[in-house]
Image (cartoon, grey):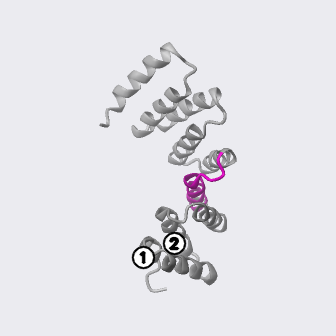
Amino acid sequence: IGRYEEAIVCYERALAIDLRNGVVWCNKGNSLSDLERYEEAVICYDRALEIDLRDATARYKKGNALDSLGKFELAINCFDKVIAIDPLNTKAWNDKGLMFAKLNRHQERIACYDKASEIDPSAAYVWFNKGNALAGLVHETKPILDCWVQDVLLPSHQLCLANYGDY
């Protein structure tokens, strides 16, 4: 219901009882992120990761917070660690691609979307992002055709098709 400040108070009370609860640290970080208090959120995610280095959720959320702070390379590092824990994490592959986009590293961006779409061919947001990437690289006709073929094979992915305009 969006009462993030109150939620943070509750998380702080829970942490006063048990500082070693990584889920509470992560949820506090989520509420701070919702309030756009990203630096504080990163601290909370780090505390969760001190408790469990393999906490893919805290690592993923930290990557998102670092993205919001404009720290794209650090965000990529977080998404890489999520992928090391869970190689089939479509969202981590997708968001890593988004970071590469912000760094104008388009080949790496497309490779991330390729992997994400291989893992989950029904993830429309991945096809949308891949379409956006390919629209910026129109000289690469084979990937564009591959995306078109995928759209024909999976007609529900109109987002991919919509990004090509008159190409």
- SS for callout 1: helix
> What amino acid type should be assigned to the residue bearing mark 2?
Gly
Of 110 and 101, nearer the camera is: 110
Residue in view at x 45 percent, y 20 percent: 12
Residue 155 belongs to magenta span: no
Seen in the picture, residue 48 relative to 145 is either above or below; the reply is above
Residue under circle 1? Answer: 162
- Quadrant of residue 1 within the rendered picture: top left
Image position, residue 120 (x, y; %): 56, 61
- Quadrant of residue 54 within the rendered picture: top right
The outermost residue toward the front is 153
Q: Are marks 1 and 2 in contact (CB under 8 Å)?
A: yes
Residue in view at x 58 percent, y 29 percent: 48
Residue under circle 2? Answer: 131
The magenta span reads 86-101
Seen in the picture, residue 53 relative to 142 is either above or below; the reply is above
Residue 97 belongs to magenta span: yes
> What amino acid type should be assigned to the residue bearing mark 1?
Ala
